[in-house]
Structures are given as C-alpha cells and as structure tokens.
Amino acid sequence: MKLTFWGAAQQVTGSMHLLEIGHYKILIDCGLDYEKETYQEENQQFPFDPASINLVILTHAHIDHSGNLPTLVRMGFDGQVLCTPPTADLTSILLFDSVELFLRKAGRKPRTKRGNFSGPKPLYLHKHVMDTIDRFVTIAFNKPFKINGDISLTFVPVGHLLGAAAAILTINDNGIEKKIAFTGDIGRENYPVLVNPEPLPEVDYVVSEATYGGRMHTKDQTIEERLVQEITEACIKSPGRLIIPAFSIGRTQSLVFALNQIFTKKLLPPIQIFVDSPMAIQATEIYRKHHNLVNQEAKDFYQTMGDEFEFEHLAYVQTMKESKDVSNYFDPCIIISSAGMLEGGRIQDHLYYNIQNYYCTILFIGYCAKGTLGYKLLSGAPIVRIKDREMMVYATIRQTDLLSGHGDHNDLVKTIKQTGQPKKVFLVHGEDKSLQSLSLALQEEGFNVEVPERGAVFEL
C-alpha cells in the first residue's frame, strides 16, 4: 500500500492525496490550490494520469477540497466520487459558482473571432461540473461501505461544515488488515448549527489537517458576546455599517443563526441585516433539507422559535439590482457577503464602495490564504487593488476566530490521540509554523510524525 501527497502538503489549500492498494488507486479529495497568482494554470497539471484513478473520496464540499474535481473529470477520470449527501448537494453549487468565477476572470467577451479568452482560460465549464455531479455516490455517516473485496469506507462526522467527514478506510493488504484515517477538516465543539466532531476509531495511520496547529481559539468571550461588541461599536455607537465577509456555505448559516439568537433575546436594538449572496440562499435551503444533521441546539431552537435562518430585519438579497440598493442603504446595517477571502463574489462590490469609508468596519470571521485580498487587508496593507483600481484603506479592519470552523491546536491533538497509537501521523493542510508546532506537540506525546513535502511517497 502506497500513499503519495499531491496537495495541501506544507501549505493549506489544494488537498489531494493518492492511496494505491495494489493496482487500485483512490484519490482522497481533489481541491483547488489557489495560493499562487497563476493557480488556474497550475491546477490543470495533474502529476498523474486522471484516467488511472479508480475512485475519489470527498471529505467535504469546500473548494480547497472539491474544486478541482471537474478538471479531473475533464481530463479522463470516469470513476465514482463517494461523499455524504449534504456534501454532494453543497459541492454542486460551489462548483457551478467556480465556473462563473472562471468566466468572469476570462472575460465575458472573446478577445478575437477565434474565441480566445482575454483572461486565463477557465479550468472547466458547466458541462464538466454536470459530468462530475453525475459521478457522486452518497453514503450515510457511520455506515461501512464496501468499495471492493479488500477495501471498506466509513464516514465519521467531524463538524466543520454540514456533511463534513473523516474518511476511515479499512484495507486488506495481502492478508493484513490496515486502517487509515483521513481527517479532512476538523470542526470544533459547541459551534452554531453544526454537530460536535465524533471520536475517531483506532487506526494504523492518520492523515490530519493542521490549520490551527500551535494556535488556540479565544476562550474569554463567546460568539454571542463578540458579535454584540462588534455590532455595538460599528452600528450603534456610531451610525456606520458592519461588513462581514463570510463563505456562503457553512459560515453564513452559522453566523445568521448566531445573530438570530442575539436579536431574539433582544440583546441589541433592531438593525437591518443583509445577506448578499445568491449561493448562501441556495446553501441555506440545503441546510433546511438536511435538518436532521444539524446540532441539537439548532433543532431545539426550530421547535420553540421557528426557522433558525429567518427573523425580522433579516433580508436575503437575490438580484444585482437589490445588491446595488444595499450599497445605497444609509442607515446602520450589517452586510454579510461572500467570498470569505474576498477573491470574488458580491463582497468586492461592497468593498469597492466602503473600503474608503471611515464609518465602515470589516470583520473577518475566517481564514484567509496568503496572496488573497483578505490576507492583504489583515496584514495591514494601506492600499489594495479592487476592481482594477488602487484604493486607500480607511475602513476599520477587525478579525475574530470565534466563528472559525476549524478546531484549534488542542482539538487537533485530542482528535489524533483518539486514534490510539498509529504507526505514523502525517500532517497536511497548514502553514509551516502550524505544521511544525503541531508536529512538535504530537512528538512530545509519543507519536511518530511526518510533515510530507508535495510528491512525497510512503509505503504503508
């Protein structure tokens, strides 16, 4: 049995790991690597023949885990993609959104009569997304699924996102049973809407994310307390606006539920809230569809107070006209829009009109990869480029980790310790400092730890 690390190796994005059992090849995740300016060109260069892959296992829908699946299909992969039912639904809307982003970058009008794009050529088109969706086969949580006579798969809930799972593979390797766990992205306990991560079984090998290695989440405030503080500062003490960049899938639903609880308890006077993201509207419908998989707090709220994602003074913005009207809304308000790293979507319109507004606060509630506009703002850049224009940053830039969907250092260590005494722990999906911090902590606990480079191959 052989494991090769082709993505998220010594970096965060682009998760992609190749497991070979004899001649049978399984790809675990196939995400977009967008840490380079030329990421569209980089992502179509697979280091293996896509047609040689027999199966893909998808841990969850986020684009850094799912976003290159249509490229894989376009280049010859014709096998199944195994995932949970919510992951299939959420991935579908994310992939279609990726196509729209590619087309916007390419330029809506061809450069010449021969049809050349003025910008980078799209990685894939709608047809390739539809071909990918046709390959989804959904599996329920905690139900062993026999892939073939030698391999079975079990998905274990890990929070982080609706449908997110650790993939546990039990393999008969020449008469020897071996177990390997791919954690995907690990969530955290007591997070709005999402279930707590379930304990992982004992295994022989672990491939774990390390996003928050060496870092602890804020403990001296609750999500509710922090949001009340930020809204008070931005919208009540001064008549300004609070813009919250949030991923349409996952983060927005948890944020809306948290705001619903705040205003239901009358902790703040009524303030208009706009959710400006058509994809968030679609994702919210999927959360409603799979309501049996939300946490008990959300289920109880639904039984006593009604829909977690609807309340007075909350408006979901559909059309571009409505979005422009939000920009002309001059009373204090909260605008939730995507994308979370500011690399596309309607959030760029709101930034364009507000980045030079002294009465605007931009509150980041999630991770921003290096090179993204969000990362530049968080790094204190005094001037940023938005819509081909250099703009001074006058808005207040704030950040909180309380709504991060990732478990922190202690959560990661706890998850790995659940797996017993594996022969080796591989750490991926983290910046160098995080990887090294988590590696050192695990080694002190007696674990054999490896931080693989891209292309590193291990015999298991």
Image: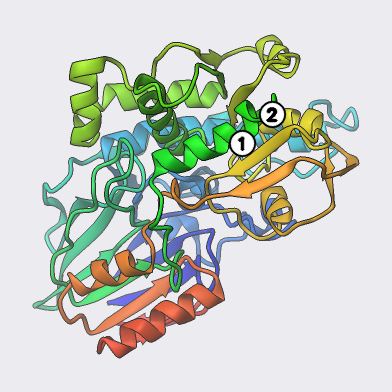
Residue 209 as seen in the image, left or right of residue 198: right
Q: Which residue is drawn at 24% across and 43% down?
A: 195
Res 233 label: 1
What colour scheme does the image use?
Answer: rainbow
Q: Is residue 408 visible?
A: yes
Q: Can residue 133 be seen in this view?
A: no
Q: Which residue is drawn at 50% across and 65% down?
A: 8
Q: Which residue is drawn at 34% across and 45% down?
A: 81
**Amino acid beneath label 2:** Ser
Task: Give above or below for 402 relative to 443.
Answer: above
Distance of label 2 from label 1 (alpha carbons): 7 Å
- For the N terminus, the image quarter is bottom left
Residue indicated by mark 2: 238
**Amino acid beneath label 1:** Glu
Q: What element carries label 1?
A: helix
Contact (Cβ within 8 Å) of mark 2 with mark 1: yes
Q: What element carries label 2?
A: loop
Residue 325 as seen in the image, left or right of residue 270: right
Task: Give above or below for 302 relative to 135.
Answer: above
